[in-house]
Amino acid sequence: MGCDERARLDQQHSQAKARYDAARETLDSKMGVSSRDEFRRLTHAIDEAWVALERARYLLDRHVKEHGCEQSREASGEAAAEG
């Protein structure tokens, strides 16, 4: 039987990763064609998304360590995909 808290934290982590990836993709697509103000706004969005991703990762890792959940992020292949 799976851990509901683990599933919730996994979902939060996946959502945070998707937001970070989207922010990076937006900046990449605007590189060289955006105004200075837009560039600052986009880099700020990336910074905020990174902080949220790091927090989600921390909470998930802490839960797995403290709770001893049977499946680790590494086993799911997610950690390797993050690079």
Image (cartoon, helix red, strand yellow):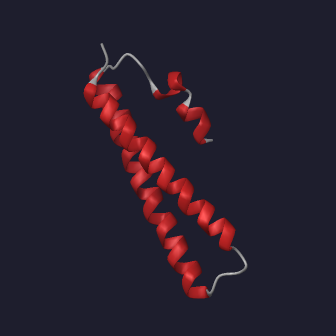
Task: Please indicate whether residue 10 sits to the left or right of residue 38 in the image.
Answer: left
Query: Outermost residue toward the right?
Result: 32
Q: Position of residue 16 (x, y in %)?
A: 43, 50
Vertical position of residue 54 compared to residue 46: above or below: above
Query: Outermost residue toward the top?
Result: 1
Q: Residue at x 69, y 73 (%)?
A: 31
Vertical position of residue 13 compared to residue 39: above or below: above
Q: Residue at x 62, y 68 (%)?
A: 27
**Which of the pair 7/68 is nearer the observer?**
7
Q: Quadrant of residue 4?
A: top left
Query: What number of labels is visible?
Result: 0
Q: Quadrant of the C terminus?
A: top right
Q: Quadrant of the N terminus?
A: top left
Q: Position of residue 81 (x, y in %)?
A: 61, 37
Q: Residue at x 56, y 54 (%)?
A: 21
Q: Quadrant of residue 57?
A: top left
Q: Residue at x 51, y 25 (%)?
A: 76
Q: Position of residue 34 (x, y in %)?
A: 65, 82
Q: Quadrant of residue 60?
A: top left
**Which of the pair 79/26 is nearer the observer?**
26
Q: Position of residue 12 (x, y in %)?
A: 36, 43
Vertical position of residue 31 compared to residue 70: above or below: below
Vertical position of residue 47 compared to residue 19: above or below: below
Task: Please indicate whether residue 34 sits to the left or right of residue 52 in the image.
Answer: right
